[in-house]
């Protein structure tokens, strides 16, 4: 019956050669057979796989659906271990941990992976193992500000606060707070981690949190493609997914404070959450696309790039509501095989995040589709998740977008460049596809089916009911006698002991078609604009043809050849994009900044007299050779203290990622009055090497050898900003 699933998901005529146990896709077949012992046998391009009877059992008209549900449980059991290991920790020796590992190729616990997987339903299967996995990612401090913190994994340019998605931990923890000890640890970690994020990652001018996205690593789709400028950009940009995760963490903090009798703290957290939600909608929504941008530059520069996880999280969290939520999901493009994790794709990057389907992201898109009552999208994401697992014989990390293959050979662009069987969050996605996607079992443990009517023949066949056996109950969905509508929802629920019977009814909801006609690629980015002084202004040109010029993050207009830009009383930063025949913009070129820039050399403290009233940008030129630019835990984090005459001290966090030479730190802003003398001093901030658990990190500096939060400081760089700069 998966043939009907495929037809419904793609809104095309069903392919030939399907029956209730077999599917065909691009010349490949998979076939599921029920075994006498309650298990299944799956045959496909990979060979033959025997699947034992599973603790949880779905009973539908499709052996493929039921067998893949059992296969996901088998792989979850294989991902459940008593020890973990990774070459970067304890020299690769096993570390005791009754945890979930990330996959065959990733036998360790990573904050991002385990948290998303638990949120996608793994908390139901082994709550204590889920708690132990999350506890493994908590650490007291061994230096810096005392507290209990969520660990940001090794990553971009030396980890946090360049990467700031560790707050995804709380997305998982919210399901496991029935254990008093774990709940107390979670509340403490929530308080301390949010305070640290506020101190070092929050930008008050935009009301947003800086850092890379929770999944996408900006320009690079594979680590060898990184440059130090890319890493610097990640640390300076704002990402949609990261900010939605912070919003959800703040909402949880408010709820927990209220539940424990601290009304004022709850009010404060809720005010922060409301302000962040408003800022996300103000800065990330792109009206001309009807989509949320994946990220924006540190000065608010819009990027014509989008990601499915950020979009889905915005919808399912309630950051996007009403018509905007429906519009964001409807405008996000998809392909017959599934929905890409980023769009548009990059021609010069191999398949990994680029040009790829990630099942766990598809599972969040499935949630968002349920939240917006979108039958076509529900079917499409559900089918994509199950089809990939059936043809691969495992719940793989990712698939190529157009073929749903586990690997395509395209020379230097071949990929996915990394792909692991039984990837934990992909396993969770397959379980979620059945538990919530088919049977409507939500994260709040409510039963709320939302089944596209087009899936009824596949799931019910000629029968009246389908069933799901759980440890504590049996859920039975009964189809209506007549289906007059495009979505099946609850009519009424009858509970008798452990038997829960849900009688469905058909309703008419808006029929939103999938967007299947989007162009695949974005154009390549142009080189940085060249700017020459021209009287009181600047003569600007971009090599290589027509471009769209941006001035201080705002579109200035088309540039074909050269243009004259008026001068301004402050720093002026230029970037450019290419626009193709479809109207799709490239990534931005590197910035070219011109204007009155001052460099203060010499050791601290450094002194300076403000030339004008107003805001100023400040950064450091530095070198940080303590690790590679794609990993590690020793991004240097400092607090710049600015003491100007006649004003209170101002504090600006500056981050210096790992570098392969001299480069510029993230920037901050401060204000000063004309003629005021200012002194600049640096205080230590906090980085991931300050966590006690970092003692196990043996791959690079900052771990077993002790905390390290240093960089070679060169010049302090100052520039006045235009008065209307955010």
Image (cartoon, rainbow, N blue to C red):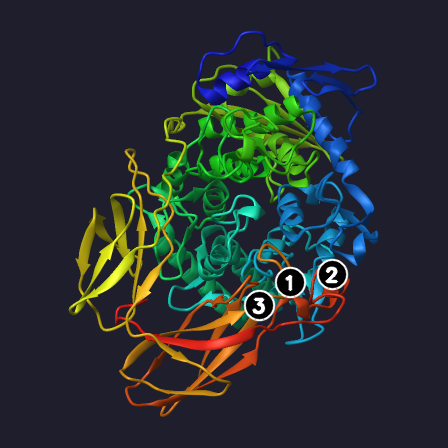
Q: Residues within 10 Å of mark 1 (few under 14, many from 20)?
A: many
> Residue 361: x and y, percent?
55, 39
Q: Considering the numbered disc 2 on the image, is that residue within a helix, a strand or a loop?
A: loop
Numbered disc in front, either 2 or 3:
3
Q: Residues within 10 Å of mark 2 (few under 14, many from 20)?
A: many
Q: Residues within 10 Å of mark 3 (few under 14, many from 20)?
A: many
Report which quarter residue 51 is drawn in: top right
> Residue 388: x and y, percent?
61, 26
Pointers 2 and 1 in contact (CB under 8 A)? yes
Report which quarter residue 155 is drawn in: bottom right
In the rendering, which numbered label is found on residue 536?
Answer: none
Q: Considering the numbered disc 3 on the image, is that residue within a helix, a strand or a loop?
A: loop
Q: Is residue 148 left or right of residue 538?
A: right
Q: Is residue 586 visible?
A: yes
* Residue marked by disc 2: 697
- Decide which of tag 2 and tag 3 comes sooner along the chain: 3
The quadrant of the picture occupied by the N terminus is top right
Residue at image x 56%, y 66%?
194
Q: Considering the numbered disc 1 on the image, is that residue within a helix, a strand or a loop?
A: loop
Measured Cα–Cα span from mark 1 to mark 3: 12 Å
In the rendering, which numbered label is found on residue 633?
Answer: 1
82 up-or-down from 153: above or below? above
What residue occupies the far left of the structure in this picture?
Answer: 535
- Decide which of tag 2 and tag 1 comes sooner along the chain: 1
Q: Is residue 453 visible?
A: no
Measured Cα–Cα span from mark 2 to mark 3: 19 Å
Q: Is residue 692 left or right of residue 444?
A: right
Report which quarter residue 164 is drawn in: bottom right
> Residue 538: x and y, percent?
21, 63
* Residue marked by disc 3: 624
481 up-or-down from 599: above or below? above
């Amino acid at each position: 019956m998966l043939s009907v699933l495929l037809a419904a998901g793609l809104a095309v005529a069903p392919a030939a050669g399907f029956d209730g146990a077999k599917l065909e896709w691009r010349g490949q077949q998979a076939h599921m057979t029920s075994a006498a012992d309650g298990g299944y046998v799956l045959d496909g391009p990979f060979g033959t796989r025997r699947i034992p009877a599973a603790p949880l059992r779905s009973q539908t008209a499709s052996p493929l659906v039921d067998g893949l549900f059992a296969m996901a449980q088998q792989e979850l059991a294989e991902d459940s271990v008593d020890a973990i290991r990774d070459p970067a920790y304890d020299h690769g020796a096993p570390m005791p941990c009754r945890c979930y590992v990330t996959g065959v190729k990733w036998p360790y616990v990573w904050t991002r992976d385990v948290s998303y997987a638990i949120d996608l339903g793994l908390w139901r299967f082994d709550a204590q193992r889920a708690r132990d996995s999350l506890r493994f990612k908590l650490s007291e401090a061994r230096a810096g500000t005392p507290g209990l913190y969520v660990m940001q994994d090794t990553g971009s340019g030396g980890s946090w606060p360049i990467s700031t998605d560790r707050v995804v931990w709380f997305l998982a923890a919210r399901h496991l707070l029935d254990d008093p000890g774990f709940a107390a640890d979670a509340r403490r970690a929530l308080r301390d981690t949010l305070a640290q994020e506020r101190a070092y990652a929050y930008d008050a001018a935009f009301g947003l949190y800086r850092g890379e996205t929770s999944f996408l690593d900006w320009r690079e789709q594979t680590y060898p493609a990184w440059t130090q400028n890319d890493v610097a950009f990640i640390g300076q940009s704002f990402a949609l997914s990261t900010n939605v995760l912070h919003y959800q963490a703040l909402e949880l903090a408010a709820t927990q404070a209220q539940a424990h009798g601290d009304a004022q703290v709850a009010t404060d957290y809720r005010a922060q959450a409301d302000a962040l939600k408003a800022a996300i909608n103000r800065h990330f929504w792109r009206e001309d696309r009807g989509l949320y941008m994946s990220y924006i530059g540190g000065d608010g520069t819009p990027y014509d790039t989008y990601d499915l996880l950020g979009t889905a999280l915005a919808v399912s969290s309630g950051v996007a509501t009403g018509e905007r939520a429906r519009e964001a999901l409807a405008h996000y493009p998809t392909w017959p095989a599934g929905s890409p994790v980023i769009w548009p794709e990059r021609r010069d990057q191999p398949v990994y995040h680029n040009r790829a389907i990630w099942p766990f992201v598809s599972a969040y898109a499935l949630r968002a589709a349920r939240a917006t009552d979108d039958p076509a999208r529900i079917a499409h994401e559900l089918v994509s998740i199950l089809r990939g697992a059936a043809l691969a014989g495992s719940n793989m990390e990712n698939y190529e977008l157009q073929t749903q293959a586990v690997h395509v050979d395209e020379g230097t662009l071949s990929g996915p460049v990394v792909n692991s069987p039984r990837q934990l969050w992909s396993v969770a996605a397959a379980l979620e596809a059945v538990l919530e996607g088919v049977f409507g079992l939500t994260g709040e443990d409510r039963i709320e089916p939302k089944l596209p009517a087009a899936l009824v023949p596949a799931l019910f066949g000629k029968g009246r009911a389908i069933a799901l056996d759980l440890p504590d109950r049996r859920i039975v969905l009964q189809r209506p006698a007549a289906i007059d509508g495009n979505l099946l929802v609850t009519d009424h629920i009858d509970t008798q002991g452990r038997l829960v019977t849900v009688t469905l009814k058909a309703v008419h909801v808006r029929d939103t078609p999938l967007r299947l006609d989007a162009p695949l690629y974005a154009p390549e980015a142009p080189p940085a604009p060249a700017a020459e002084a021209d009287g009181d202004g600047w003569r600007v040109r971009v090599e290589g043809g027509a471009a769209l010029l941006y001035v201080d993050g705002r579109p200035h207009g088309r540039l074909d050849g050269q243009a004259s830009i008026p001068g301004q009383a402050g720093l002026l930063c230029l970037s450019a994009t290419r626009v193709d025949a479809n109207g799709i913009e490239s990534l931005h070129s590197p910035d070219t900044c011109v204007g009155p820039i001052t460099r203060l050399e010499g050791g601290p403290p450094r002194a300076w007299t403000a030339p004008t009233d107003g805001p100023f940008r400040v950064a450091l030129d530095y070198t940080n050779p303590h690790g590679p630019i794609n990993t590690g835990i020793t991004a240097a984090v400092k607090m710049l203290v600015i003491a100007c005459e006649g004003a209170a001290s101002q504090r600006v966090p500056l981050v210096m990622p790992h570098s392969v030479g001299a480069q510029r730190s993230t920037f901050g802003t401060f204000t000063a009055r004309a003629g005021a003398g200012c002194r600049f001093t640096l205080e230590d901030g906090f980085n991931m090497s300050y966590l006690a658990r970092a003692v196990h990190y043996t791959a690079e500096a900052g771990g077993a050898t002790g905390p390290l939060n240093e960089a070679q400081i060169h010049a302090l760089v100052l520039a006045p900003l235009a008065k209307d700069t955010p």
